[in-house]
Amino acid sequence: MTTMTIAKAINEGLRASLTNNPKSLLMGEDIGPLGGVYRVTDGLIREFGADRVVDTPLAESGIVGTAIGLALRGYRPVCEIQFDGFVFPGFNQITTQLAKMHSRSGGKLTVPVVIRIPYGGGIGSIEHHSESPEALFAHTAGLRIITPSNAHDAYWMIQQAVDCTDPVIFFEPKRRYWLKGEVDIENPGPASDPFQAHVLREGSDATIVAYGPLVPVALAAAAAAEEDGRSIEVIDLRSISPIDFDTVTASVKKTGRLIVAHEAPTFGGIGGEIAARISERAFLHLEAPVIRVGGFHMPYPVAKVEEDYLPDIDKILEALDRSLAY
Amino acid sequence: MGATELPTPGINGTGLGQQSPAGGASGDPAAEMIQLLGPDGKLGTDPVFSDYAKRLDPEQLRGFYADMAKVRRFDQEATALQRQGELALWVPLTGQEAAQIGSGRATQRQDYIFPTYREHGVALTRDVDLAELLKLFRGISNGGWDPTENNFHLYTLVLAAQTLHSVGYAMGIQRDQKLAEANGSNDPKAAVVAYFGDGASSEGDVHESMVFAASYNAPVVFFCQNNHWAISVPTEVQTKVPLFNRAKGYGFPGIRVDGNDVIAVHAVTEWALEHAREGRGPVLIEAYTYRVGAHTTADDPTKYRESAEETAWRGKDPLDRLEKYLRNEGLADEAFFEQVRADGDKLAAHVRSTTQNLRGPNFRESFAGVYAEPHPLVAEELAWFEEYSAGFEGDEEEGTGN
Ligand SMILES: Cc1ncc(C[n+]2csc(CCOP(=O)(O)OP(=O)(O)O)c2C)c(N)n1
């Protein structure tokens, strides 16, 4: 066991992938000598050279589109998109090309491309640097979407993304980049399936599902609720597409109540998808409607007021109160 | 910075990539176009490309004609099939046969081709069964053929998206060759050809693909068929300078070739592919040609262009001029042309019977292709569909696509 930050864990995971798989390579803006704006690729170009750690022209469609070509040639490119709000010039390539190449070819072609996107707010940044566009990608069949919330997962999940035959969008919770945690680099343990949700805390009165940056918030809310005598189960979803509904359903059958928390706007979001599925799967076990805690239907607000926008402990506790009142 | 300072050793002295903008002093946009075989069927000379033309033996020249005639016949048959309701849509290529056969025949087996959606002639040169192309247009597949079999990628309907795939693929070739050389292998070197239209040249992906290709010196040949129209919009709305001139801005050679002259297209593409395979980087070829018919069977060109324009271009027909040349030089006799006609009819019959027998896939197959690895949501939805369908047991017709 070693302790490291999430950013360092992704860096180590990428290093392991580059070492173990000669066909893997990294591409993105400023990822070479600078090591990326968040330094996630720090030092990798020195070790692996400019053919494996490619500083690309400033062109997101170009990055994703050429990565598709490299994947068709047998390579495993890992693309870094500098910030969530800048993925959209590459959105066409991701949704119309990357996601569909396998099905269009009747399974003859695979495009194992990983798209790394630092996402989410809470860092006091400016426009386009704090968005959570995961639902836009989740709606597209053919893509897999995962997001780690701790260093151990970050280390293993990035490697699993590189190994995956399908394209994977790897959302990195940027405000947690500096969150430290223990990483077992010998053994993934329960992290061996990146598409499985993890029950981080057992409870009996209600379930909170969260992922990425909101996992620590959900845990803190559960701890606060415990002081009021409430026993709250917390699930780290880890995979946004596919979603491990079995784990969520089992938990709801036990607790009877569900809160889903994410930073993205609730309207048309992942929370709505979970609410709908759970009402289909566990309707008779529910003691209260599924409640979503998320962003408002507005562009991500300016940093001075983002605290009001972001789901926090109080918003989750308020949702818990509402749920428990039924 | 002049083009002579660019790192393209192969073009020194040829003047390639150095043409003046907007068609030069004469103001004629086609003024600086490479042409070997004129509309009169006479072979001219060119300081660089005549040498390439000399490599062609009579057998190959007859082959070019046979290919062009075949794909034109195929085009007519597919158009008829669409009219008869056998295809949802057809994208005709008549007029562009020389651009496609000339370039396609210049590729080698190890090269990889990224077409757009009108490259039926290129498909023919890559030995793709033309009936396979029709699956897409019959609405029974979003692909249709195995791209790995002939190194001929699937058609791409989102304009210009494939130009980036081509550059990435070329970057992969570069890496593979580096490794192969280190291991002492002397496999034939490969390059990539990316096809796109004059309309698609306005899409951002073409720009980005050229930036990437230039930055990494990727072995890719950009082959733009300027057929003068993007559905109803003329080339002048897409660009103020001849398209081949854009290459200069990216730092690689651009060549405009008479796209109705199969010999010149072949020569120029061979040159460009050699340039790319030898590690000298990308080339842009603009094949100056014309879409004689409609954009697709859903289009009505009388709404936006004069028929005189079409008539003028018919006078430059790629098949007519090669036929004249072959006859004048005594390289083909009447029996040859008879045979070509007979082969065309045979192909048309094959395409017709194959198409009519092309049945839709079983809908269940659509679940299988979504992901390469097992996916619980897909499995769950398939299970639901199976159970739901079981309720209609007996009513169901296999293979109707429903
Ligand atoms: C991104 C995108 N926008 C619009 C279309 C619709 N569309 C299909 S073909 C076409 C014109 C293309 O013209 P050009 O690139 O010159 O090729 P041509 O069909 O003439 O060979 C348009 C607008 C499309 N397929 N993709």
Image (cartoon, coloured by chain):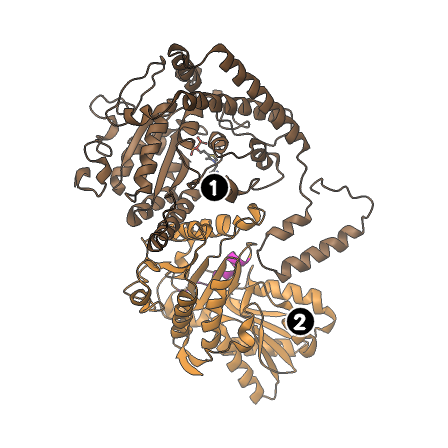
Badge 2 is on which residue? A249
Q: As shown in the figure, which amino acid type bears the numbered disc 1?
A: Asn
User: In the rendered image of this protein, which colour is used for chain B?
Assistant: brown
Badge 1 is on which residue? B151
Residue that appears at 20% across and 42% down = B6
Instruction: Judge depth for marks 1 and 2 and give the one in front.
Output: 1
**Residue B274 drawn at (x, y percent):** 32, 37
How many labels sit on residues? 2
User: In the rendered image of this protein, which colour is used for chain A?
Assistant: orange
Say few, some or many: other residues with alpha carbon within 10 Å of mark 1 (under 14 / 14 to 19 / 20 or more).
Answer: many
**Residue B113 drawn at (x, y percent):** 44, 39
- Magenta stretch? A130-138
Q: Is residue B369 left or right of residue B61?
A: right
Q: Quadrant of ligand 1?
A: top left
Q: Is residue A148 visible?
A: no
- Chain hosting mark 1: B
Residue that appears at 33% across and 14% down = B42
Q: As shown in the figure, which amino acid type bears the numbered disc 2?
A: Thr
